[in-house]
Amino acid sequence: MPILSRETILEKISSREIVLRPFREDHVQPASVDLCISDDFLQVDDSQQSVIDFSTEIQYKSVHAQEIILPPKSFILAKTLEYLEVPLDLTAFVEGRSSIGRLGLFIQNAGWIDSGFKGTITLELFNANSVPIRLQAGKRVCQLVFMTLDRKLKQGYSGKYQGQLDVTGSRINHEK
């Protein structure tokens, strides 16, 4: 399954096969698109729970700020500034930018972005460093890589995160 090149990404965005808003052409790399962090974050509310398990709804504190300090060895959820729609013949995955990883900030998206997904991408951020890291809204933090499927799907993703526009905490407690 080939990874899309810069030229193909630009063609698919131009034809609106891929929706990416806001879009900046200078964020398109040779085989990926850089995405930015928004000004919305979620932190686990440790005053509301002493343990996290798979069957109980997790309580979060919402933080809206242009910048936030992520202490050493701590975790926060964020979202991309960009809204994305993935067509039924593509899938995508998120990778942290190497310049960000070299600061000790691990950026992950838990799994693939399935064909048919629409929404913003919730990112899991972990500061593996021994000093705090300042996160600033609007900065490029990760990259989106597109791959073609062996065939176009008849129906795309329709799971519990479809259409998310806000930072979305875990919904594992919704699973059976």
Image (cartoon, helix red, strand yellow):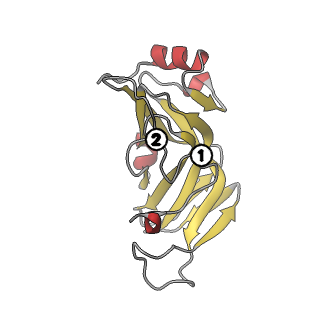
> Would you place residue 58 above or below residue 29 in this image?
below
Examine the image and state in which quarter residue 42 appears: bottom right
Q: Which mark, by number, is residue 157?
A: 2
Examine the image and state in which quarter residue 140 appears: top right
Residue 9: image x %, image y %?
49, 20
Nearest the eye: 73 or 90: 90
> Would you place residue 128 above or below residue 56 in this image?
above
Q: Amino acid at mark 2?
A: Tyr
Give the residue displayed 61% in from the left and 60% down from the top.
41
Q: CA distance from mark 2 to mark 1?
A: 10 Å
Residue under label 1: 163
Residue 10: image x %, image y %?
53, 17
Instruction: Answer left or right for 1 relative to 142.
Output: left
Nearest the eye: 103 or 1: 1
Give the residue displayed 47% in from the left and 57% down from the top.
125
Q: Amino acid at mark 1?
A: Gly
